[in-house]
Amino acid sequence: LVKTGASERKPIDAETAADLQSAIDRGESSRFGIARLATLDLDDAVVAPPKWTRRRRADGSLTLLRYAALRGRPKIVEMLLRAGAAPTSWAAASEVIDVDAFDELPNDAAARVLVAAARMAEAAEAGGAPAGSFAWTALEEA
């Protein structure tokens, strides 16, 4: 946990979530400063899932961590992990994260794994691609 002097993390309101989602879309990693993120409850922060997403949490939402991974933003995923986002918050419904394996990885490697896994899971769910392949561009085109 990052030491900021804050006694507890605050829930992310809808406006902040929308602002961070927009920053993810634009790849603006500068909006994810550690001082800002360390005061926020990153595990329960949800964003409005775009229509092209199929793998979501049971309530139909996506966390910032999952969304950044889906958008292919490993630097932002790494920043979220460094600020205390739990790898388990990345998981969509019926997915399981091996937390012990992630504890062994440096944050930059864990971020790349989460990006690849999210995009592969989404592409596999999308269907339409030949067996054994993934339609990467379909994620951003939809």
Image (tube, rainbow, N blue to C red):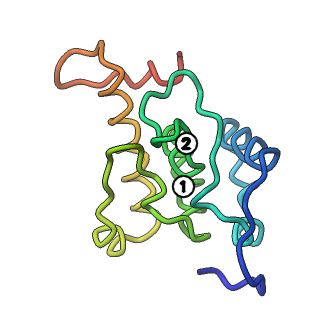
Residue at the location (43% across, 46% down)? Answer: 115
Mark 2 touches mark 1? (CB < 8 Å): no
Judge from the rendering whether residue 49 lies leftward or rightward of residue 38; answer left or right.
left
Tell me where residue 140 appears, x and y as whole percent. 53, 23
Q: Badge 2, how many Cα within 10 Å: few under 14, some, many 20+?
A: many
Which quarter of the picture shows residue 87? bottom left
Which quarter of the picture shows residue 117? top left
Q: With respect to residue 78, does 1 lie above or below? A: below
Residue at the location (42% across, 44% down)? Answer: 92
Q: Tell me which amino acid carries mark 2.
A: Leu
* Quadrant in the picture for the N terminus: bottom right
- So how many labels did they put on this image? 2
Residue at the location (69% across, 41% down)? Answer: 21
Q: What label does residue 77 carry, if any?
A: 1
Q: Earlier in the sequence, mark 2 or mark 1?
A: 2
Q: Tell me which amino acid carries mark 1.
A: Val
Tell me where residue 48 appears, x and y as whole percent. 65, 35
Judge from the rendering whether residue 49 lies leftward or rightward of residue 54; answer left or right.
right
Residue at the location (74% across, 56% down)? Answer: 12
Tag 1 secondary structure: helix
Tag 2 secondary structure: strand
Q: Farthest front residue?
A: 59
Q: What label does residue 62 carry, if any?
A: 2
